[in-house]
Image (cartoon, rainbow, N blue to C red):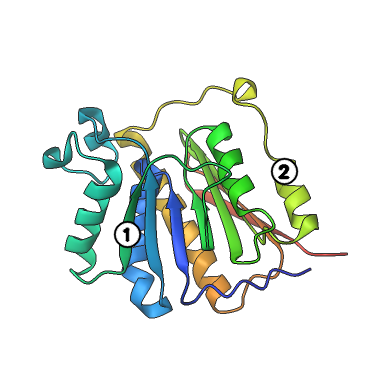
Amino acid sequence: MALKADARKQDLNIIGNGSLGSFTALALIKMARAFGWRLKLFDFDTVEPHNIRNQLYRDTDIGAPKTEALESILKHLGGADAPLAAVPGRVDRTTPLHGIVIVTVDKMKERREAFEAAKYRADVSLFVDARSGGDGAMVYALDPRDPDQVRRYEETLYEDEEAIPAPCADERTIPTIFAIAAAIARVLALCANGGLHSFIEVLLNFEKLPITSSKEYKED
């Protein structure tokens, strides 16, 4: 089954509104009107002072729920009538999701829960998972209704205890964060224009000069 996600006129569910999620949301709200998207912001956390260093938030947002603070920022930057909604709280496998799901969380357990909520749902057409650590990142895109693509994606999942510790995001990782947000936005634009037809894997390496590579796993 090929990836045939219609990425126009759909909800974009951004799960995780930290450094990666907040900058991704900024890119996508600027594109939202052109593609008919409505952003839904999911996060359970509040803005803390150290978040100001590498996330989109302002000093005045400290103590506020991230979803509400990000909604306010995006309305200011994207227009008062920007199509978005804040959904505070954790996402788990029982969360009703519709449209396109974009996962920008830190922990594999949270990633698994989001995927279980999206997997094999007729009304979830595209699942995008972005993972970052220091100067590197991976972005996966797939049709969560396709058993072959689901199997390939689930092979990339592991337990949090198995993860190699990566440096925490800070001001030095901002270029990488912007690049990941751009990669996600490009994947969605290609999908909206019929340019994606299989499981996609994008690798970004900013250790020295920026290096980007991608693979498209076509069906046999």
Residue 70 higher or lower than 2, as above or below = above
Q: Which mark is residue 154?
A: 2
Residue 56 higher or lower than 28, as above or below = above
Residue sitting farthest toward the right: 220
Question: Hey, which quadrant is residue 218 in on the image?
Answer: bottom right
Residue 210 higher or lower than 161, as above or below = below
Q: Is residue 26 visible?
A: no
Residue 126 higher or lower than 10, as above or below = above
- Position of the N terminus by quadrant: bottom right
User: Secondary structure beneath disc 2?
Assistant: helix
Image position, residue 42 (x, y; %): 39, 48
Left or right relative to 16: residue 141: right
Q: Which mark is residue 130?
A: none
- As shown in the figure, which amino acid type bears the numbered disc 1? Ala
Please tell me which residue lies in front, 65 or 94: 94
Image position, residue 59 (x, y; %): 13, 38
Q: Residue at coordinates 24% horizontally, 59% vertically from top-left?
A: 74
Task: Give the distance between the C-alpha atoms of the residues marked 1 and 2, in whole angstroms.
Answer: 29 Å
Question: How busy is the neighbourhood of tag 1: few (under 14 within 10 Å), some, or many (20 plus)?
Answer: some
Q: Which mark is residue 85?
A: 1
Q: Disc 1 or disc 2, which is closer to the eye? A: 1
Q: Residue at coordinates 83% horizontally, 65% vertically from top-left?
A: 219
